[in-house]
Image: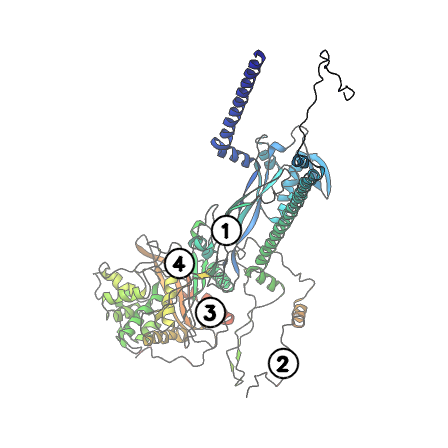
Amino acid sequence: MHSARITAGRLRLTMLVVVAIVAVFVVKLVDFQVVRAQELTLAAESRRTIPVTTYGERGSIVDANGTVLADSVERYDITAAPVNVDWETGLTQITIDGERRAVSNQEAVAKIAELTGSVAADLMAALEADRKSQFAYLVKAVDLDTFTSVWDLDIAWVYSDMRPSRVYPSGAIAGNLVGFLGLDEPLSGTERRWDECLAAENGQSSYERSADGVRLPGSLVVETEPSDGGTVHLTIDADLQWFAQQKLAERAAEVGADWGTAMLVRVDTGEIVVAADWPSIDPNDLNSVGPDDAGARSFVAPFEPGSIMKPVAFAALLDQGLITPDTQLVVPGRYTEGLPAGEYITDVFAHGDLRWTATGILMNSSNIGTVMLSNRMSLEERYEYFRKFGFGQPTEVDFLGESVPGNHGRVFTPGEIDAVSAATQMFGQGITATSAQMVSLYQTLGNGGVRMPLTLVAGCEHPDGTWTDVPVPNGERVVSEYAAETTLQMMETVATQGGLRSVITVPGYRLAAKTGTGEVAENGRYGSERIVSLAGVFPADDPEYALVVTLAKPDIMKSSAAAAPTFNAIMEQVIKTFRVQPSTEPAPDLALTW
Amino acid sequence: MSALPLASPRPDRAAPRPRRHLEVAPTRAQRRARPRLLPAVVTMGGIGVILLAQLLLSIVLADGAYRIADLQREQRDLQRQEQALTEELEVLSSTQNLTANAEHLGMIASGNPVFLDLSTGAVSGTPTPAGGSLTGSSGNQIGNALITGETLVQVSTTSPLEAGGSAGTGGSAAPPPVSTGTIPSPTTR
């Protein structure tokens, strides 16, 4: 009986020990599997899981013909892990010409520097900055050829990162319109204004990999898919844009202008074919021009346009039935009526009383005559016409920065305008406008008095082929068809009888043109600086294009004669490019004097 | 034991009766349930086959993973190459580059276009002589940092005249020369 008791005691003890051990295991199990499960799983996964960012491609910007103006490319950062460098022996295995051999670390770095065109000492310094570091940049953003040649050296401590980058294959052509990217975000132009369309979404995925870097089967987890950006289609013709910029640059250098713009618009659609700025930035090289020249003056730099504004007055007066082309007027050499004491208006050349018709006033660009005729309209009516022609408000293009007050010109309301400006605004002083607004005026006159919304972007084409933001060409009538066509006929006298007729006309084509020499106010006074323009619509008998060329502050030739050759060259190139048919009927012969 | 005479009236007390070893006789069912070799072999073999299959499967999978990795690398390389070539092409087709190359070959800008109305034979437009260089004396003013300035064709090997001649015969899209006196016109009646 005694031994049996002992046996039972042992058994009980054993059971107790077993239960205790099992209890310990259970506690540990619960701890691992439940309490710290997430933490441990994460730790385990991070040891073998590789997260990867999959890049979506930022959309490109193309012109009307599909010529690429901005495109996304891949560049490669060459990086190193200094901790993997063999600092003790100072040797690195590299492959040169298919032959594997050991060279000194310095030689290996020198080889990388040679291939990437960088300074070996800089690379060595980056590598040696912290010998225990896992990561150091050697060379940033090299192209594929360079990257491949470095990669082929097969150096164990060299790594790489892909870096999405941007190129502008056409350089400064439309550089003012396209804009550019900063390090993290678009900074200017279409790149910024249309970022919503262009921007790509990067994707995120992860996979587990084996010791030799091969992805374990079935371990790829895609968390978010990348999506590519859309393509922004501009209405610009890159070749013509180049030509206009080139001619502006040549002429600006000849006459010593500070800047120049040229805008060409299809009259029936309002599409902008050319919006040239000189100087214009080359987005590939942000230092190519100064900060003042990096934007698009044609859209955001209003100026006092001078006489190219006069067609507003004549079209409005014709629309109201207040004048005909033959309306007779005696125009004095000095005009003071309705102006404060001491103020007077003159014409560009001194004259006594002249018997001009309305056409003669427009052809001779008489300030006095224009003001005398405009006095037949109330201030409210004048203001209404200016607004309906699109002045004093951003154009429909809504170019980046255009909606900022001060960037879209100013038309004084009848309440705030003074007596002098009320008169001078009719000949384009005391009122400011951008080149885009000016070309919109001539588009309206060329389109029978119907103003079409100006368009620069034909739409955003998404990767799936759908289009959004396609402009709806809903025109708005500003003046009657009769008023618009008659104004053009009156303007034709500038091209048939004006002083610049031999310079601006292209043989065989009728042209309705207007010259403009705006005085530039500086510090509240008008000085000797001028902004000179030539604006026109052609062919005048069946208008297709409206063109405005402006040069600012020329040193020599401070009149519209400075802009005339550029206007002519661009008009001729447009005729050649778009195969514009010659005019079939001669211009009407309107009387200038009586 | 069987030699013990049954006739002996007394059992021999001194000699203890030998303890008999007793065994439970297996029933028929128990006998049948005894482990047999065949099922064991089949089971073990089955497990072996399954393990082997699993091994092979994972070898194939791993091999596939390597192939996928290889192909993906190849695809990535090809995509990179395509992109680099596209990039190069875009720069080559930029207006600045085309103009420079065209002028390098001696090409000049045309004059005013003249239109020929095929139905009436009427000519409209005013012809002007070809206008010479597009860029004038100062050369291209519109910068492009991507262009190296090299021209694609060397003029030393191709004179402008030869270039014009070869362009005329080389282009298969060029229209055939029109015989004098006849104007190609639609023959709808």
Q: Residue at x 51, y 70 (%)?
A: A577
Of all chains, the one bearing label 3 is A
Q: CA distance from mark 4 to mark 1?
A: 21 Å
Q: Amino acid at mark 1?
A: Ser
Check whether the beta carbons of the residues at disc 3 and disc 2 lie within 8 A of each other.
no
Q: Is residue B35 visible?
A: yes
Decide: few, some or many residues near mark 3? Use Cα within 10 Å; few <14, some 14-19, many ≥20: many
Element at badge 1?
loop
Spatial CA distance of label 4 from label 3 is 21 Å
Q: Which residue is mark 1?
A: A288
Instruction: Kindly identify which numbered label has been placed on residue A299.
Output: 4
Disc 3 to disc 2, C-alpha distance = 31 Å
Q: Residue furthest right?
A: B3
Lower position in the chain sequence, tag 4 or tag 3 = 4
Q: Nearer the viewer, residue B171 or A584?
A: B171
Same chain shared by disc 3 and disc 2: no
Residue for badge 3: A571
